Each structure stands twice: as structure tokens, then as C-alpha cells.
Amino acid sequence: MLIKDLSKFCGEEVTLKGWVANKRDSKGLVFIILRDGSGLCQCVGDINILGEDSFNNAVSLGLESSVILSGKVVADERQVGGFELQIREIKILQDVKNYPISKKEHGIEFLMDNRHLWLRSNRQWAIMKIRNRIIYSIHNFFQSEDFVQMDAPLFTGNACEGTSTLFETDYYGEPAYLSQSGQLYGEAMAMAMGKIYTFGPTFRAEKSKTRRHLSEFWMIEPEMAYFDIYENMDLIEKFLQYVIIDVLKNCKNELKTIERNTSMLESSLQPFPRLTYDEAVRIIKGEQDVNGQNSITSLEKLLDETKSKSEEITNEITEREQKIKTPGMKKGEINFNQNKIDQLKNDLKEIEEELRNIPQWINSAKNFEYGNDLGGSDETVITRLFNSPIMVYDWPHAVKAFYLKRNPEDSRFARGVDVLAPEGYGEIVGGGERETDLNMLIEKINEHKLPMEAFEWYLDLRRYGSVPHAGFGLGLERLVTWICKLKHVRESIPFPRMYGRLLP
Ligand code: 4AD
Ligand code: MG
């Protein structure tokens, strides 16, 4: 019996198994908010029904105690989920004292150290449910489009995305690398199947702390024989919109729990603007406006607004700090204000971070050097100007991977495409059309100083039945982070692996 199914049992006797998410009591009644993984339900115990002993045990239950509750389901639209359980019997499996995560504000490091418990909180629960739906929807999309799912190896003998982020391991005395991408294997399989996708973990040694980088993340990599870069972009758009529609339809409750304003997801159901690298650079540098907005002046405005917000919050903190010093103030009111102060201080930390970031964004946008790859701040600058993801294609070949096809009309560019998510999120997809010219590939492998013998098998794909083909890689956590509008990618995966963290 699951809480999510209670509506089918109105008026009947049921048994719920779960954990105490919240609890209060008043005048012979105890109110337990029970969480069973499928939802939350208020369960009410009456001293006259439970008897004094059982009632007292219920009243003293700590947060996250495990309990089995039996009783009658009644409709009550004021309650979470719209139903209430009138408890007849309580079975306590474990009465927990001093659960480490309380209702007060906790710092992020504390919560990360307690990730194994933090996953039970409403917000984390909702994020994980959305992640689950996204995974389900990704498989549905590709399976319904006749793609074959394939698992690429995780131990590899060669780099795919450059050597700087490889994790080296010992493979029977030989060095092996944890896979950075399944793409090269995907290309081989596409020559056997036509259309394939991989969905597996990938590893990158990212020795810096950013809000976008994990050391272990899940990637979806479709690869399609006989696709060019334009057909690739059409597929990316169709795919991402399919997932967004599915989440909007099936995760209403979860999106509400995390207070996601979904207007940007809805506006992302329009065609994604497609910009060449050249155009993107002009926009970033403020040489070309977008929808009447200029990248530099709009950032300067944002900076002013953020400054006044910071002043407002600082003033409110000072006011409340004065207030709780008032003699004779009730304890409840002091606590309320102290909690508010803690919250405001957390908000202020974020605003101060923005105050440090925005001038850097302005600076790096103004001084962007044509020919470079886009950095995180450049992506933030350009995506702020759009209300859907954008696709940037035809990149200077020197800044992109060795396997990308050179643009036949202008050999300065390679046929790569990046999808940048709006609201400042930046790159969620990287892909492109693949080089089919054997000699060009050999030249590129040498240029990137990659060991030729490890790529001989890959070159065979150009020797035996070579065809135009294309594909892309979607970072699952980057997509979850944007769809849920999280501040940091670490909340998009159950147990994040990133620079400086291996536990829990
Ligand atoms: O752009 P990337 O490096 O492209 C590839 O790996 C290609 N082989 C994909 C392909 O064409 N088959 O990575 C693809 C995506 C990025 O757009 C980003 O979403 C995600 O993978 N990604 C990361 N996500 C989290 N943490 C990291 N350190 C990531 N590095 C890349
Ligand atoms: Mg990339």
C-alpha cells in the first residue's frame, strides 16, 4: 500500500509503512506526517483510540523514526495529498533520537557530508524523482525512434575527449583509462545498427570546483549513420523537447515542490535558435543585439540591481538583529527571527557571489578573443539573452575534438554543435558531424599527440564502408540541473563525485 494510491482506498482500512517526516501534538491528538517514498500523508492519532501508552510513544517519536501505521483513510483536501489517515494502530520499528538534519538552515558542506540522509528531504526527493522521469523519457524517445541502446566499455585504452582529464587505472599491469565518452565505440556500433545510443557513466578528472563539473557523470550519446550536422541538430531539438514535455506533464507535483517556475521550460518548446560560432562571438562581445538586448549593457543593469538587493538584505539583517535584542521578547519570536536571519545570511552569500561574478562576466565578454572556445562565463552571458536553449555550430577546428568533420566550404571550421541551456546554465550537449576523410583524421590524431596504435581500430571504420555520420552527447546531470533550476550540479545526482569529494 503506497501513499500515492490512497485515493483508491477512501473510507477503507489500510496499512502504511514509512518514516516520520514531521510531527506535532496537541490536546490528546498526535499528527504524524508520514513519508513512504511515494508521497506524504498526515496521520492522526487520538489518545482515546490508541490508549495512553501507545499515544505517549507516538508523541515522543523523533524525526525519521520508522513506523507502520494502520487506520482508516479519509478525504481532507487541506492535507498534503488530499487524504488523512486516522490511526488505529502504531507499530514502531525504530524510535530515532537526534536525527542530524533538522528544520533549521544547514550549510551546504554539512548537507553534502550527510548526503545519505539528505536524500530523504522533500526537495531532494523531488529532484531525484524528476531525474528518474528524465531517464525514463530518454529511453522512451530513442527506443520509439528505432535506436538500439548499446553499452560502451568503461575501461578504455585511448582518450576520446583529450588527455588532460583522464583517470588512469591499473589494468593487469598496463595503464587503462576510465572512459570520458562512449562515442568512438558508438560510431562502430552505428555502422552495424544504423542508429544507436549509449547511456552510461563517464569520468573526467576535473581539478577545479565549478557548479557544472562532476568527475563522474552520466552521458547519453546517440550516433546516427547517414546523418549530417543539420539532421543532427533537428534530432537534438526534437529529443530535448520530448523530454521537457514529458517532465512538464508527469512531474507537476515535483516541480511544484522545488518551486520551479516552468515558464522557461514552456518557452523552450519553440525551435531553438541556431547560431554559428561567428554570430555567437559577436553577441557575446556586444557587437550584435538579441531581441533588442545587448549583452554588456544588460549585465551592467543586472549588476546595479544586484547591488541594491544586497543593500536591502543587509539592512533587514541589521534590523532583525536589533529586534531580537529587545528585552522581554518571547522565545518563539526570537527563534523565528534568528531563523530568518540565518536564511537571509545564506541569501546574502549567494548575492555576494553574484556581485563577484557579474564584473568577471562583463570583463571576459568584452575581452573575448575570437578563435577561443567559449568558457563558462561566456556561455552564461549569451544564454541570458534567450528564452530557450540555443545551438552554436561551426566552431574553429583547433578548439574542438579531433574527430569532428571539417566544414567543406570553409576549412577553418569544424562541424561541431553545442547546445547551451538558458537561464545562465550553458552547455548541456556537445556533438557534431564526424570526419570521414582518413588522412585528415590521421593528421588530427597526430596534431593532438594521441597514440596512433590505440586508434587503429577506429580508423578501420573509415576504411571499410565509411559513411557520413553524426551524433551528440547529453550530460544527464547538466540537463537535470537546468530542468530543476538547481544552483549546482551536485544536487542532480544521488552521490556526486567531484574534486574534493569521495564520501559518502
Ligand atoms: O562536450 P563533450 O565533452 O562531448 C563529448 O564527450 C562527445 N564525445 C559527445 C558526442 O558527440 N558523442 O561532453 C558532452 C556533454 C557536455 O555537453 C556536458 O553536458 C557533459 O557531457 N559534461 C559534463 N557533465 C558534468 N560534469 C562534467 N565534468 C562534464 N563534462 C562534460
Ligand atoms: Mg563540450
Image (cartoon, rainbow, N blue to C red):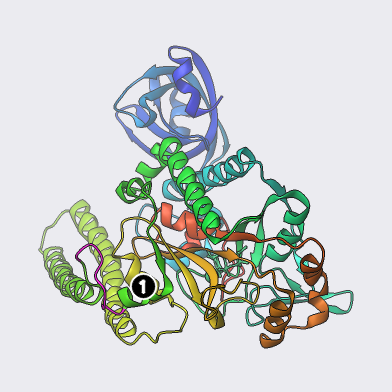
As helix, strand or loop, the secondary structure at mark 1 comes to helix
The residue located at (36%, 32%) in the rendering is: 80
Residue 262 visible (yes or no): yes
The quadrant holding residue 105 is: bottom left
Spot occupied by residue 213 in the image (x, y as percentages of width and height): 52, 70
The residue located at (41%, 52%) in the rendering is: 484
Task: In this rendered view, identify the residue nearer to me: 292 or 53.
Answer: 292
Amino acid, disc 1: Glu
Query: Is residue 168 shown in magenta?
Result: no
> Taking 392 as reference, is 220 left or right?
right
| Residue that lies at the very extreme toward the right in this rendered image | 172
Q: Is residue 233 above or below residue 88?
A: below
Task: In this rendered view, identify the residue nearer to me: 495 or 173.
Answer: 173
What stretch of residues is rendered in magenta?
285-292
Image quadrant of ligand 2? bottom right
| Count of picture labels | 1
| Residue that lies at the very extreme toward the front in this rendered image | 409
Residue 100 visible (yes or no): no
Spot occupied by residue 412 in the image (x, y as percentages of width and height): 52, 81
- Which residue corresponds to mark 1? 279
The residue located at (44%, 45%) in the rendering is: 244
Spot occupied by residue 266 in the image (x, y as percentages of width and height): 34, 45
Query: Is residue 289 shown in magenta?
Result: yes
Spot occupied by residue 38 in the image (x, y as percentages of width and height): 51, 34
The local crowd at label 1, few if under 14, some if 14 to 19, many if 20 or more residues have their Cα within 10 Å, is some
Task: In this rendered view, identify the residue nearer to me: 56 or 385.
Answer: 385
Main SS of the magenta part reads loop
> Taking 94 as reference, is 172 left or right?
right
